[in-house]
Amino acid sequence: MSEIVVPATAARPRRRLSRRKSFRRVLPWLVIAAIFLLWQAFVDGFRIESFVLPSPTAIFAAGWQWHGPILASAWQTFMETAIGFFFAIVVGLCAGIVIGSSSLIYDGFYPALVGFNTIPKVAVVPILIIWFGVGAIPAIITAFLLSFFPILVNVATGIATVEPELQDVLRALGASKWQMIRKVGLPRAMPYFFASLKVAITVAFVGSIIAETVGSNGGIGNLMLVASSRFEVPLAFAGLLVTGAMGIGMYAIAGVIEARMTGWATRSGMDLNTRS
Amino acid sequence: MTQRPMKSFVELYQVSLRYGEDGDGTLALQDTTLHVDKGEFVAVVGPSGCGKSTLMKVVTGLWPATAGGVIVNGREVDGPLSITGMAFQNPTLLPWRTTFDNVMLPLEIAQPHAAKLRRERAMYEAKVSDLLALVGLKGFEDKFPWQLSGGMQQRASICRAVIHDPSLLMLDEPFGALDMFTREELWLALQELWLARRPTVILVTHDLREAAFLADRVLVMSARPGRIVADRTVALPRPRALSMTYEPYAVGLVQELRDHISAAREAA
């Protein structure tokens, strides 16, 4: 039969491909290093005072000097974010399935959800503190509130956009609504879901740190607030860096899980080579 | 309901269908009456937009008819029929499943197979392998749809339509997007499949040679709103060879069908 598909890659292009692949892997680190180098050169070159913009070396020095409190704060922020994010996944996934599987519910609930999502969450934090007191709970709830919406929207979109012909095939087989969601809607929504996780995890960090900054007795947000009130600007920046690093770490984890679960959706040339 | 004796498998009696809820939508079918016998292979041809696809939806119960009666297998159709297999111009395979798992899908859903699948998995898996081999997909079971060519995807799609032994097979221009050589290969594969299992088939197509090659009977539909304007039996022996479509009988038949369609278009 003439219908062979998998492109036969010749040896030379493949070697070039693998060199490109390893370059692709180190590129993010090169970019980060370049940013720090430029930053250092900028601060040194213009003799900028460290309480205005500390240099990366000053930030790393402060980070090392205060590594105990920073790690403790980072751990608290991480836990709050992780718990809030976990609930965001559960609620976002369930609500997304419900909303995506019925156009009636979709039309009915969507405006209210959009309205709710438009409220700046920083304005909600004081209310949460009145309700739950200063501590971890407002931060968890803020992280949840910020991150569940992108998950919900994406899951709902994935489920609501199943091709009508595919629906006909399934309905003609006597599939129940739940079977259609389980066999087609959910797997189809997975790429959307994982894409949304990458957005949601970063905004979850934003949420917990906002809450810590407004009112908390711990966490990176609180550390930064205290540090800047004492003009320990390098320490405040060290807090920022740690937060950024945690965000990148969680993003990378989400990316790995995504590639595992939904390789079919990205189907790059790389996939073809490993699979066939 | 009808005067005809109840021997037909599919029976449409003065069926009309109007899209839209208030009766002001497009009239897609008007007073369509047709019957298809059990195990018969019927092709429906007509000018584009004549309601052929609508006819499929009405027969399978996916769309309720606005007026008239639809009887399949001796029962009035009032909801989706679970005895049907369907394939479309777009293969609609699930991209996260391999070819093999795509063909397994109906067995996981349609009864009585879904209930027996757990106990008799090996039997069903053998069945899927045999079917894939029959249409020339042996060795491609573990490939994902995007690793297959258009023709192979369509073969898999047809396998998925017949794996659960549906007594009614609805094909909506399944070869419409393929090149002619692939199309002819698939005609042969489909004929073989039909001869082996003898489901009742309703094939909607644009291609008159395809209709002449595959069908026992060809129905010509008029332009929208669709009605059946001609009904021609194809008296060619089975199994048919591709060369038969170039012999005088088939050429004459195709020409005749063409004339009917031209007339149907002018009447619109």
Image (cartoon, coloured by chain):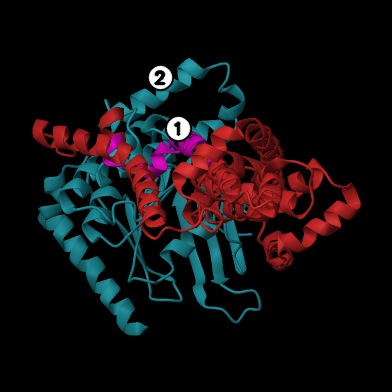
Say if residue B82 shows up in the picture.
no
Please, which chain is the residue tagged with disc 2 on? B
Q: Position of residue A199 (x, y in %)?
A: 55, 50
The foreground one among B136 and B250 is B136
Left or right for B93, reference B5: left
Examine the rendered structure and indicate whether residue A38 appears above or below residue A108.
above
Which quarter shows the C terminus of chain A?
Answer: top left
Rendered red, the chain in question is A
Drawn colour of chain B? Answer: cyan
Which quarter shows the N terminus of chain A?
Answer: top left
The residue shown at (23%, 40%) is: B188
The amino acid pointed to by label 1 is Arg
The residue shown at (39%, 50%) is: A40
Q: Does the segment drawn in magenta span residue A266? A: yes
The amino acid pointed to by label 2 is Ala
Left or right for A87, reference B18: right
| Residue at numbered disc 1 | A260
Q: Position of residue A232 (x, y in %)?
A: 62, 48
The foreground one among A113 and A27 is A27
Q: Which mark is residue B126?
A: 2
Q: Which residues are the magenta region?
A: A250-270
The residue shown at (29%, 27%) is: B133
